[in-house]
Amino acid sequence: MPSNKSVSDAPITQFINCRILKDHKLQREDLWVREGRILNPEKLFFDEQGYADKHVDCKGSIIAPGFIDVQINGGYGIDFSLVSEDISGGVSVVAKKILEHGVTSFCPTLVTSPAAVYHKVLPQVKVHNGGQHGAGVLGFHLEGPFISAEKKGAHPEQYLRTFQSGGVQDLMEVYGSLDNVTMVTLAPELANSQSVVRELCQRGITVSLGHSVANLSQAEEAVQHGASFITHLFNAMLPFHHRDPGIVGLLTSDQVPAGRTVYYGMIADGIHTNPAALRIAHRAHPSGLVLVTDAITAMGLPPGRHTLGQQVIEIQGLHAHVAGTKTLSGSIATMDMCVRHFKQASGCSVEEALEAASLHPAQLLGISHNKGKLDYGCDAVSVLDTSVLRSIYISGIYSASSSKSSL
């Protein structure tokens, strides 16, 4: 018999025999879904007299919120920082592929590029929800070009910019528009950067600090003006020093405004950050850790030569370097790999590892009211897995196939 239709004609799916990540704990509880939303079963039973049209036996697996990747440069042969004949189609290819690794929302990331690239790429990709077609797009992450030449990493120096016109005008000249932009990474020590931080935050755009030689005071000033994220902690910034810990010091700073949290990205691929450094960061500020892949075009492809924007990248094993150098240039790791490595390297709980890829990035972007959690009313896009390895989309829930690897 069909479910009660007083509210909606859509079928109701009940996931049974599962452990749900809810309120920071794995709980044995069923999950009810209708039209892509998580239902409150009490209201369903007593207000609608409704019940499930379909039951899915999860066989003891974990259901966790879908992963959110706020820094991903491309993958599977697609480079978000290159102009192509079908820019949105390329993004869609990556969106479809990363579903298999539990990512249900992401921020396509552009590295430092000529202004013409931003003008052509940014208008082509709109913010949209995910589904069977692929992960949802949350908006662009623009990593550069307003960064330090000294800490440019794999960013091409000839395209770096400063805020010569006082700030916002420079942004518009380079980017063309801030529509569909969710995050901007900049170096807070650049002249006039603080007015830019304020303006971006007033527009609802997350400001991240990175590729920078900023001292702690400069980083704290940026946070006081609204910055809330650190791009790939430890990488492309001054190393920690006991007299001036630099941007790293934000993890324990007493100058962060009350009620605010500074989040920080970690590339937990086993290459970018030594496990000891990862443990130090996590133990100092566990609630701020956000796992990112920083994946490049070569993710999902064999070793060889690929691109990252204007640079040629050489892949050897799991290492990605600017060709002919030892400069790291993103990763080829998938998010499920990062979740597993983070748990193993940090010794954290399964819950903490999963929330670092789901709840924390949602909180960072201010979307935790409907993503990053399995609360009633939230989006029903989740990872159902014992291994968090490969996922397929079924009935609004991401269900993973079995694997020898596990959390």
Image (tube, helix red, strand yellow):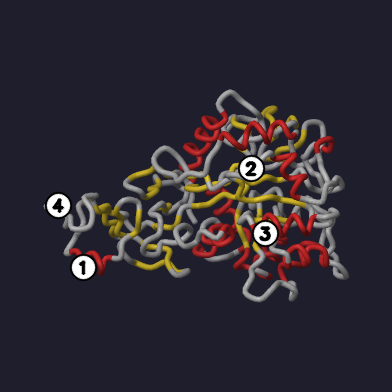
Amino acid type of the residue tagged 2 in the rendering: Thr
Comparing labels 1 and 4, the label whose residue is closer to the camera:
1
Task: Estimate the x, y position of residue 197 in percent, counting from the top left.
Answer: 73, 57
Disc with the residue nearer the chain's start (3 vs 4):
4
Q: Residue at x 67, y 62 (%)?
A: 228
Task: Estimate the x, y position of residue 221 in percent, counting from the top left.
Answer: 78, 66
Evaluate if marks 1 and 4 touch, with contact meaning CB atoms under 8 Å apart. no
Q: In this figure, which residue is indicated by the disc labeled 1?
A: 47
**Distance CA(mark 1)–CA(mark 3):** 42 Å
Evaluate if marks 4 and 2 touch, with contact meaning CB atoms under 8 Å apart. no
Q: Residue at x 77, y 58 (%)?
A: 195
Amino acid type of the residue tagged 3 in the rendering: Phe
Q: Is residue 237 left or right of residue 53?
A: right
Mark number for residue 109?
A: 2
The residue lying toward the viewer, choosing from 309 and 84, is: 84
The residue lying toward the viewer, choosing from 254 and 76, is: 254
**Distance CA(mark 2)–CA(mark 3):** 15 Å
Disc with the residue nearer the chain's start (4 vs 2):
4
Q: In this figure, which residue is indicated by the disc labeled 3?
A: 229
Disc with the residue nearer the chain's start (1 vs 4):
4
Amino acid type of the residue tagged 1 in the rendering: Asp
Q: In this figure, which residue is indicated by the disc labeled 4?
A: 2
Evaluate if marks 1 and 2 touch, with contact meaning CB atoms under 8 Å apart. no
